[in-house]
Amino acid sequence: MRLAWRLARRLVILLAVSVVIFAVLRLLRADPVAMLMAPNASLADITALRHTLGLDQPVAVQYARWLGGMLHGDFGHSLQNGQPIGPVLATALPTTIQLLCGGLLLGVSGGIASSIYAFSRRDTVAEKVSELVNGLAISIPDFLWGILLILAFGIALKWLPFLGPIDNQYTVARHTGALLIDTLIDGQFAAFGNALLHLVLPCVALGMGIAPPLMRILRSSLLDTYAEEYIAAARLRGLSEAQILFRHGLRNAALPTINILAMQVSLLIGGTLLIEKVFGMPGIGSLMVNAIGARDLPMIQALALVYAVVVQGVNALTDAFEVLFNPRLRLE
C-alpha cells in the first residue's frame, strides 16, 4: 500500500511537470509557424499552417493534444528538419543510457570503495587526507571534470580518445543502438575496445558527480551505525571486523545512502547534457542543447518530458528499494 501511494505520487508529479514544461515554453518568443514558413508567405498560408499544427486552438486543448500524443508515442515533428521526433529520440537514447550506466557503475563503485577506505582508517592521517581529497572533488562540477580529463589524458598524455563514440575507421551495423552491444553482436572486438575507450573519460566525469557525495554520506552512516549496541554485540560473538562491516555495517548504513544516491542519479541524468556536448556524444543531451539553440519547441518539450520520466522512474525505484530494505515501511 505504501509503495502504491508513492508510485501514484510520482505520476501526479509527472503530470505537474508536463504542465510546467508546456506552459513555460509557451512564454518563449518563438513562433513555430514563423520558423517553418518562408518570409514572403501569405497570410492565408500562415493561417492554414497554424490550423494544421493546432496552434489556433485554446492552450488547454493544445496541451491535451500534446500530452495525448506523447502517451501514444507521438512526440511530434522537429521544427529543424520536419522529421518525427520519436525515431530521433530512439536513435540517441542508447548512447545516453551507455553513459549513464557507465557513470553510475564507476560512481557507485568509487563512492563505496572510498567510504570503506576512509572509515577503516578512521582517526588516522589517511582519513584526514581522504576527507580533504573528497572535499576538493565534490566542489568540481562534472562538466569541468570532463574538460580536465580531456586536457590531462586526451591531449597532454594522449592515453585515451575524447571525441565521438568511436573512431571513424570502424563501421558498425545498428542493432540496438548501443555501440558496445552492437559491436559484440557483429563480432567486432577491436571496435568494441575502441568504443569502450571512448566511454572511459565521459563516464569517469559523470561518476565524479556521484562518488564524492556518496562517500561522505556512506561514511557518516557507517559511523552512526557502529555506535549502535548490536555492533558491540557482534564483536562479543567473535565476528571479525570484515564480517561486522559487510554483514551489519553496510547493510544498515545503506538506507540513508539510497536517498542520496537517487538524488545524485537525478543530477547525473541532467549532467549528460553538457558531458555529451563536451565529448561529442550523439545522445539526447546533445539533442537538447541543439534544440535549445534552434528554438525547436516540439523537440525541447519531448526531451524535457523524457528527462522528467527518467528522473521520476529512478525515484520510484528508490521508493521500492526503501520499502524492500526497511521492514517498518512494509508494515505501515
Image (cartoon, rainbow, N blue to C red):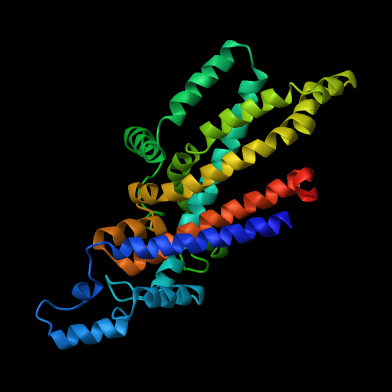
Q: Establish if 4 lies above or below 58.
A: above
Q: Which percent across, then down, holds residue 47?
A: 21, 85
Q: Quadrant of residue 302?
A: bottom left
Q: Which percent across, then down, holds residue 102?
A: 53, 47
Query: What residue is rendered at 79% in x and 32% in y?
Result: 247
Which is more toward the observer, 100 or 62? 62
Query: What residue is rendered at 43% in x and 72% in y?
Result: 86
Query: What residue is rendered at 65% in x and 36% in y?
Result: 256
- Image label count: 0
Left or right: where 165 falls relative to 249: left
Query: What residue is rendered at 28% in x and 72% in y?
Result: 79
Q: Residue furthest left?
A: 40
Left or right: where 295 falls relative to 115: left
Whether residue 92 is visible here, answered yes or no, is no
Q: Quadrant of residue 217?
A: top right
Whether residue 135 is visible here, answered yes or no, is yes
Which is more toward the observer, 246 or 332? 332
Q: Residue furthest right?
A: 237
Which is more toward the observer, 186 or 141? 141
Q: Which percent across, then down, holds residue 203?
A: 47, 44
Q: Establish if 44 lies above or below 38.
A: below
Q: Which percent across, then down, holds residue 121?
A: 64, 17
Q: Quadrant of residue 253?
A: top right
Image quarter of the N terminus: bottom right
Q: Establish if 282 lies above or below 137.
A: below
